Image (cartoon, rainbow, N blue to C red):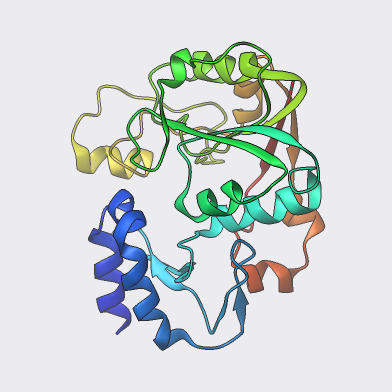
Amino acid sequence: MKSIISLVLRYIPRPYLQLVGHWAARLLSIFYTGSKVECPVCNSKYRKFLPYGRNTSSRENALCPSCLSLERHRLMALYMKRRTNFYTANLKVLHVAPEYCFIDRFEQMKNLDYITADIESPLAKVKMDIHQIPFEANTFDVAICNHVMEHVDDYILAMSELHRVLKPGGWALIQSPQDMKYEVTYEDPTITDPKEREIHFLQNDHLRLFGRNYGKELEKGGFKVTEDRFVMDELTKAEVQRYSLPGEEIVYFCQK
């Protein structure tokens, strides 16, 4: 059963999985009845989460059958609940490349004026190139833009645009895949074979892999950046296991 689930989830592209695959995931959830793990996005409980991953060996205990959250989404949900005013203040929010698991929930929150945007995602309501965000300066209280900077041509310009549209005192979450063995951002445009790019950059459509300097890269966009080791320093081992979180991921809290 595990191998069948892994194959199904691995070869359905995530945009299509987000649009139609939630029904398949919910059907599969009958094999995961229990309460050992809990999703902080949708509050569902299971024996464990579904396997998920693009590469040959998928990650165990990764995908919530109910809302399709992954480890990084559950981390964002917990972080915003415990560390920010996202759920308590009246905020105007720009969500770039919006994740399926969050959209309906954020749209229903009465304290948010919530706008989704992306250049190609069918989930976003505003078609937008992040290199040229079509909003005036000082418009938003919050910007959420996760797993985007590894895809864009000019990530410093994209970061600067997010900084520009935030109000003074506003904050952003701009997470990206990292490999801590690299001191600086790793790029190599001479690697063109898709399989080789996946080996070097985790996915063949990634243009780079950020290293330990990611916080410094975000500062080039104008942000004051706090490197928050929230998972490592604030959460118990039991919480990390219960929510199935990325245990070593640093949250980059960006302020204007």
Q: Is residue 102 left or right of residue 186?
A: right
Q: Residue at x 40, y 70 (%)?
A: 51
Q: Is residue 237 left or right of residue 52?
A: right
Q: Residue at x 77, y 61 (%)?
A: 235
Q: Is residue 35 above or below residue 5?
A: below
Q: x%, y% of residue 202? A: 37, 44
Q: How many marks?
A: 0
Snapshot quadrant of residue 212? top right
Q: Nearer the viewer, residue 57 or 176?
A: 176
Q: Nearer the viewer, residue 41 or 4?
A: 41
For the C terminus, the quadrant is top right
Q: x%, y% of residue 244? A: 59, 67
Q: Residue at x 30, y 75 (%)?
A: 5
Q: Is residue 246 visible?
A: no
Q: x%, y% of residue 35? A: 61, 85
Snapshot quadrant of residue 142? top right
Q: Is residue 199 visible?
A: yes
Q: x%, y% of residue 126? A: 43, 29
Q: Is residue 17 above or below residue 143?
A: below
Q: Nearer the viewer, residue 250 or 188?
A: 250
For the N terminus, the quadrant is bottom left
